Image (cartoon, rainbow, N blue to C red):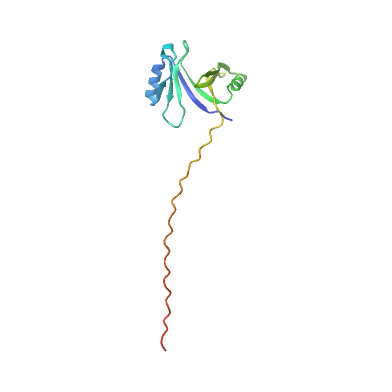
Amino acid sequence: MAAPVTHFEVNARDAKRANQFYAGLFGWTVEPTGDPASGTMYGMVNTGVKMGINGGIGQAQPGGAPSVTFYVQVEDLQSHLDRAIALGGRVVVPVTEVPGMVTFAQFADPEGNVVGMIKGPQTPPKPVAAKRKAAPRKKAAPKKKAAPKKKAKRGRK
């Protein structure tokens, strides 16, 4: 079964400036969730539209280069990391749980591009059947009364 892209992440040297840039450019709402005192600046991005995906903007690792990562949702993170290694990739972040938020992992493809994976079901939720409004019934047109039969006039003889 194919796996959907469910999240993106922009890591910048100056996360606050990146938050302002992308919010201003695309009209996104960025909700800060990091702790600036500890240097972990992160903002959850809500694009505000039904199509597409939401994401995050965060602080790059100290000494690390800015980067953009997309995340693919899979049911079994470890089996996908193992498959990435078998195909020539390498593990960047092993399976990691952020309590109350997400369980994720990252790998680098053979060219060095970092891709993330998020643990989640592969089966989309069943759509809720929309209730149909019954079309209003048309009232039957009143029946026309049949015209009385005319008696044939008989002439007198």
- In the image, residue 24 sits, relative to residue 13, either above or below, namely below
Give the image location of residue 57, x and y in percent. 44, 20
Give the image location of residue 104, x and y in percent. 53, 20
What residue is drawn where x is 41% and y is 16%? 15
17 or 125: nearer the viewer: 125
Quadrant for residue 25, please give it. top left
Quadrant for residue 20, please give it. top left
Report the side of 39 relative to 88 (left or right): left
Extreme residue in the bottom direction = 157
What residue is drawn where x is 42% and y is 73%? 148
56 or 146: nearer the viewer: 146
The total of numbered circles placed on residues is: 0
Q: Is residue 80 visible?
A: yes
Report the side of 22 relative to 82 (left or right): left
Q: Is residue 113 visible?
A: no
Query: Which part of the image, by quadrant, shows the C terminus?
Result: bottom left
Give the image location of residue 48, x and y in percent. 41, 29
